[in-house]
Image (tube, rainbow, N blue to C red):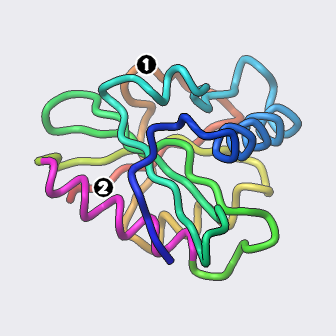
Amino acid sequence: MEIVVDDLSGPEIAGFLAEHVEEMRSLTPLESKHALDLDDLRKPDVTFWSVYDDGVLVGCGALKALDAEHAELKSMRTNTARKRSGIASTLLEHILAEARQMGFTWISLETGSAEFFRPARRLYEKYGFTYCAPFADYRLDPHSVYLTRTL
């Protein structure tokens, strides 16, 4: 597997992210959707990675700086056909290491509270994330859970 910083200019990643947003909209009410669109992911406070396996796009994830010490994990997604094959763990380990190198000491995330998101929540728990109150601009939402960890 190869993990690369992506400038989000290619049609393949645009389509992959469009599928992600469409899937999230099918699972979560619009007012509870927190996935960033392409323009937001291209902002200077966001670093975006794509994961390739033998040249095939199989996953992605991003890190958004909230301040000098705190970052938010965004847009973690694995190709549906490749779920539970270790891609998400490999990418999460990469992002955590990169966040440390960037000088962050704390990382948080928002994910869904529905059953569909249980595997994601288990992954984050496995990597030391614990449940917390809403952070940054988030508010209490029955469709969301919030997790955090120090680096």
Pointer 1 local density, CA inside 10 Å: few below 14, some 14–19, many at least 20: few
Left or right? Give the position of 146 relative to 33.
left
Residue 76 percent across, percent down from the top left: 56, 52
Residue 109 percent across, percent down from the top left: 45, 44
Which residue corresponds to mark 2?
149
Which residue corresponds to mark 1?
137
Q: State the SS at label 1.
A: loop
Left or right? Give the position of 65 relative to 93.
left
**In the figure, 18 relative to 85: above or below?**
above
**In the figure, 101 relative to 142: above or below?**
below
What amino acid type is highlighted by mark number 2? Arg
Task: Say whether disc 1 or disc 2 marks the residue closer to the N-terminus.
Answer: 1
**In the figure, 119 relative to 113: above or below?**
below
* Chief SS of the magenta region: helix
Nearer to me, 150 or 68: 68
Q: In which quarter of the image is the C terminus?
A: bottom left
Marks 1 and 2, how far apart at CA: 18 Å
Pointer 2 local density, CA inside 10 Å: few below 14, some 14–19, many at least 20: some
Q: Which residue in the rendered view is the most extreme toward the bottom?
A: 85
Count all numbered tags in the image, as a single digit. 2
> What's the magenta region?
87-102
Residue drawn 67% across and 37% down?
Answer: 14
What amino acid type is highlighted by mark number 1? Asp
Residue drawn 24% across and 53% down?
Answer: 99
Left or right? Give the position of 145 relative to 129.
right
User: Can residue 12 be found in the magenta stretch?
Assistant: no
Residue 112 percent across, percent down from the top left: 67, 44
